[in-house]
Amino acid sequence: MPVPGPSISLRELSRDYGTVRAVDSVSLEIPAGALVALVGLSGSGKSTLLKMINRLVEPTSGTIRIGDEAVDSIDAHVLRRRIGYVFQNIGLFPHMTIARNIAIGLELAGEMTGRDERIAQLLDLVELPQEMASRMPDQLSGGQQQRIGVARALATRPGLMLMDEPFGALDPVTRDNLTEQYKALHQKLGLTTIIVTHDMAEALYLADRILVMEGGQIKADATPAQLLSGNVGEEAEALVAIPRAQAAHLIALGKQA
Ligand code: ADP
Ligand code: MG
């Protein structure tokens, strides 16, 4: 088994933008190797929470520890090499080959030895053919580009992956495939992953723990089974009601046929 990714600990973490409190005193313990989904409506503070972990946003107050290190004691460049970050419309560099796009983090870190082998390995990991290495980004589909985004994020062998609606812009079939394959990758590499999604159905399928965020606070923290069985608060229930109603609707339609 691979070495598990790090644990993460947030203590009374807050972030204000002017008078808006985007994240409001969040305390959380995420164990090493967990796959956690962060779910909530637009504007609930999910992206801000994630970006404080890799220091793209500085907290107004509170602390973040990765393993036993406070993130503000780690050089930001070093920190970001240890944390993979994937977001919607990942934005590959259009004038660079796929190979260079994947290896950009290694280049920046001056890790050029074994670069080509690493690129080949990463293409395998994200289940893309080797011939993609020499292509340009605009020759890839949206789903393939997001796979390259995942490969790029994994290039420096981070233990922690932060994913912000990584497959949100893709068609549902591609998205389901990528979600499923990411889950396998998370397990295979022993990563710790926090994945933001506004889709409760995806979270229920993917994660071993779901955090429901509203107004900058964590309103529910439960396993998928606990969320489905109810009694975890109205915010969570409102989000679970959507896939539940869709499933009921499909079953009813099936009976009419
Ligand atoms: P989510 O990812 O759940 O949609 P965000 O973390 O992006 O939520 O935003 C949370 C709140 O903080 C929202 O009210 C948003 O408008 C505000 N916000 C986010 N980023 C900024 C920013 N850079 N400047 C000002 N307000 C921001
Ligand atoms: Mg967001």
Image (cartoon, grey):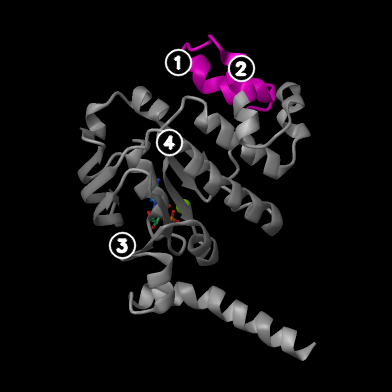
Residue 117 disc label: 2
Mark 4 vs mark 3, foreground winner is: 4
Of the 4 image quadrants, the one containing the N terminus is top left
Where is residue 143 drawn, in percent x and y? 68, 44
* Residue of label 1: 109
Residue 94 on the magenta segment: yes
Q: Amino acid at mark 3?
A: Ile
Residue with the most extreme right position: 257
Q: Amino acid at mark 1?
A: Ala
Secondary structure at badge 1 equals: loop
Residue 1 disc label: 4
* Residue of label 3: 218
Mark 2 vs mark 3, foreground winner is: 2
User: What segment is highlighted magenta in the picture?
Assistant: 93-120
Q: Compared with residue 146, is residue 122 higher up or lower down, i.e. above or below?
A: above
Mark 1 vs mark 2, foreground winner is: 2
